[in-house]
Image: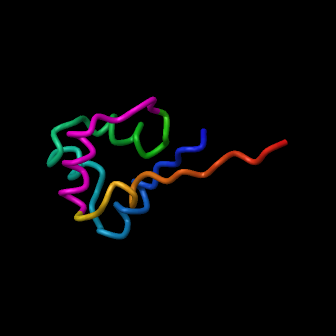
Amino acid sequence: MPIVVNLDVMLAKRKVRSRDLAEQVGITEQNISLLKSGKVKGVRFDTLEKICSVLECQPGDILEYRPEPEE
């Protein structure tokens, strides 16, 4: 998939644990784990807004577009 989730990078930069982020955002730690691994089909804007607020970052710091190489 050409959308890459860099949530683990932002968590490390901000020295925030997944558990703490989940608690502050109001979602389960399992959902944070799924987001970090990129195994989700989408993310709600209000959830993304809360994550960005807690981590003091922009959505582009978390989500990245990497086009797949053409064959």
Identify the magenta region.
40-55
Question: Which residue is at the front of the view, 11 or 2?
Answer: 2
Question: Which residue is at the front of the view, 9 or 52?
Answer: 52
Which quadrant would residue 53 be assigned to in this image? bottom left
Question: Which residue is at the front of the view, 68 or 19?
Answer: 68
Q: Is residue 28 left or right of residue 39?
A: left
Q: Residue furthest top?
A: 41
Q: Residue at x 33, y 42 (%)?
A: 32
Which quadrant would residue 16 be assigned to in this image? bottom left
Q: Residue at x 22, y 48 (%)?
A: 49
Q: Is residue 28 above or below residue 12?
A: above
Q: Is residue 23 left or right of residue 34?
A: left
Point out the image quarter for the N terminus: top right
Q: Residue at x 24, y 51 (%)?
A: 51
**Residue 42 drawn at (x, y percent):** 40, 32
Q: Residue furthest right?
A: 71
**Residue 6 drawn at (x, y percent):** 45, 55
**Residue 59 drawn at (x, y percent):** 34, 54
Numbered-mark total: 0
**Residue 70 drawn at (x, y percent):** 79, 44
Point out the image quarter for the C terminus: top right
- Mostly what secondary structure, the magenta segment? helix
Q: Is residue 25 left or right of residue 44?
A: left
Q: Residue at x 49, y 40 (%)?
A: 38
Queried whether the magenta region covers residue 45, the answer comes back as yes
Q: Is residue 13 above or below residue 69?
A: below
Queried whether the magenta region covers residue 66, the answer comes back as no
Q: Is residue 18 above or below residue 71?
A: below
